[in-house]
Amino acid sequence: MIVVTAAHGGMFRETIAMSKAFAEARSEHGQSELLDEIVAAKPKADHTRYRTPQELRDNGLRHLSTAVALLESKATTEEVEGYRRFVLTLANKVAAAHREDGQSVSPAEAEAIDQIAAALGTTNA
């Protein structure tokens, strides 16, 4: 949702891209037990009402940092890296789902992806 709300327009296409990315990850079943569990779990509705896209982004980035810290304490290095790749792949697919101002990824979306990468403790390569 951080990428979806980074730029105006394309919410429908971007949401569809998010669903497709989860479906693709489910089709790769067996490559990572952690990712298998993540993509198999039914998403829990977050009924938190954020007043601004910035508030949503700040909370989302905090959640990602917390998730990585937890994984680093409990999961293997390969599982942590797999999680990071999954989240960044998801963010990139969402960003590329809708052209904005003639660009496949808008500057606002690219900035959001960079912030996600930083929260994950990596770079968007």
Image (cartoon, rainbow, N blue to C red):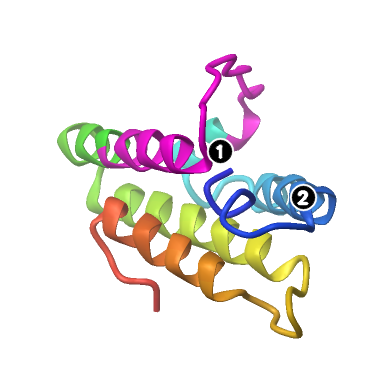
Amino acid type, mark 2: Met
Instruction: Mark 1 or mark 2: name the one nearer the start of the chain.
Output: 2
Q: Name the spot of residue 30 as percent of width and height, x first.
A: 57, 46
**Residue density around tag 2, few if under 14, some if 14–19, many if 20 or more, within 10 Å:** some
Q: With respect to residue 47, does 104 lie above or below?
A: below
Q: Which residues are magenta?
A: 39-65
* Quarter of the figure with the N terminus: top right
- In front: 120, or 22? 120
Q: Is residue 62 magenta?
A: yes
| Residue 17 shown left or right of residue 60 in the figure | right
Residue at 15 percent of width and 34 percent of height: 73
**Circle on res. 93:** none
Query: Left or right of 113: which side holds 16?
Result: right
Element on which disc 1 rests: helix
- Marks 1/2: CA distance? 26 Å
Could you tell me residue 13's position as x and y percent? 83, 55
Instruction: Kindly indicate the quadrant of the structure image that contains residue 43.
Output: top right
Above-or-below relation of 124 to 80: below
The total of numbered circles placed on residues is: 2
Residue 64 place in picture, x, y as percent? 35, 40
Question: Where residue 72 sits in the image (x, y, percent)?
Answer: 19, 41
Q: Residue at x 63, y 17 (%)?
A: 45
Q: Look at mark 1 in the image and give the residue it sits on.
A: 36
Q: Which residue is mark 2?
A: 11
Q: Residue furthest left?
A: 73
Q: Secondary structure at mark 2?
A: helix
